Image (cartoon, rainbow, N blue to C red):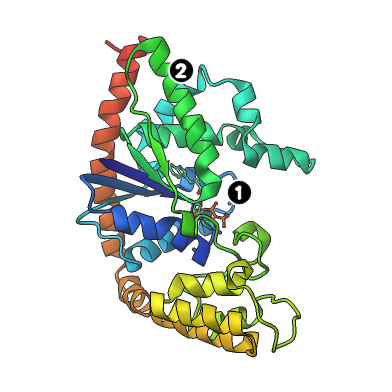
Amino acid sequence: MRVLSGIQPTGRFHWGNYFGAIQQYIDLQSEDESYYFIANLHALTTVRDPAVLRQNSLDAALDLLALGLDPNRATLFLQSDVPEVSELTWLLMTGAPMGLLERCHAYKEKKAKGLAADAGLFTYPVLMAADILAYDSDIVPVGEDQIQHIEVCRDLARAFNHQFGEVFVLPKPRVLESTAKVPGTDGEKMSKSYDNTIAVFEPPKKMRKQVMRITTDSRAMEDAKDPDTDHLYQLFSLFAGDAAREEMAALYRAGGFGYGEVKKALADAAESYFSTAHARRAELEAHPERVREILDDGASRARKKAASVLLRAQEACGIKG
Ligand code: ADP
Ligand code: TRP
């Protein structure tokens, strides 16, 4: 089985990115082949400062490695280091129905707000489809919000195969139900766009402050509460083991406790959960040249695979051969 996913370097990774996507990358890295890339071409649709994009891309690589992505098992690279994907994008762009792209949420939401969208944002799902198809990917681990894009990828691949023969492998999304939609500090989906995130590599003191600011309802301390509808409990559950999770759920049901105690327990659990990754990141930061080497090595492996799939597509549609 071949696994692939990409993540945009649009800011530091938050708990939603980690539990929704990155943790799955790490769980799946020992599959036959796994490819993970930093989607800097996609990020260009929003990050327009070159120094920021460069720094974000390096940070993304450091974060992924510190969190446990192992370059001896997985292929880690920068999206832009595989130009074959951009060529494949054009092949898929011809034949991509406008209506299909008009329904995609990133573009649709921007238009609905009356903002001017550019062609990059409009065709974003086509580049994403090329990312996936270029490696004959079977499985794409993502959070819930990316399912629509993978459906588009399947539609484009099916249409191409129908017209030109069996060229592309049809991928499937992999979404974990328990972490599909991690809540943010306001109870809505955690997302950079909503300013409700807690970053994985936030210094512990700052992280604690953010946890203390998580919104809660105003019910009295003695009231019993349902843990399953409470976003603070959901966040705690991500970090706690089974026993601690059950204990906390019982505390909610019994009532008579303050949210401050839950927040403290959450901050403690989160700090210890990410402590190894924090230490590993500090070590890696001292050797940026090692990170560059890992990315270069990953890109050359990824290019080999992408070049063979691109050639297959070019031959099928009459561009080559
Ligand atoms: P953001 O919404 O903060 O801009 P991205 O769109 O860059 O995050 O998402 C990167 C990856 O993390 C995607 O696979 C996405 O599905 C996943 N992800 C983002 N936010 C969450 C969340 N709150 N819960 C679960 N997964 C998430
Ligand atoms: N669009 C994805 C996101 O915002 C990032 C991405 C780009 C991606 N190409 C991909 C994810 C290919 C999976 C597969 O999170």
Residue 23: where, in percent of width, then height? 38, 60
Determine whether 11 is above or below 243 in the image. Answer: above
Marks 2/1 in contact by CB < 8 Å: the verdict is: no
Q: Residue at x 30, y 14 (%)?
A: 315
Image-quadrant location for residue 314: top left
Determine whether 194 is above or below 168 in the image. Answer: below
Query: Is residue 241 visible in the rendered structure shown here?
Result: no
- Count numbered badges in the picture: 2
Judge left or right: residue 284 versus residue 267: left
Image-quadrant location for residue 256: bottom right
Q: Amino acid at mark 2?
A: Ala
Label 1: which residue?
46
Q: Residue at x 52, y 62 (%)?
A: 16
> Label 1's element?
loop
Q: Residue at x 70, y 88 (%)?
A: 221
Q: Amino acid at mark 1?
A: Thr
**Dot 1, how many residues are within 10 Å of its Cα: few (below 14), some (14-19), or many (20+)?**
few
Determine whether 78 is above or below 112 in the image. Answer: below
Does label 2 or label 1 sit earlier along the sequence?
1
Q: Residue furthest right?
A: 114
**Marks 2/1: CA–CA distance:** 30 Å
Q: Residue at x 51, y 30 (%)?
A: 152
Which label sits on residue 278? none
Which label sits on residue 159? 2
Judge left or right: residue 13 versus residue 261: left
Determine whether 95 is above or below 10 in the image. Answer: above
Q: Nearer the viewer, residue 136 or 38?
A: 136
Residue 254: where, in percent of width, then height? 60, 84
Q: Nearer the viewer, residue 199 or 187?
A: 187
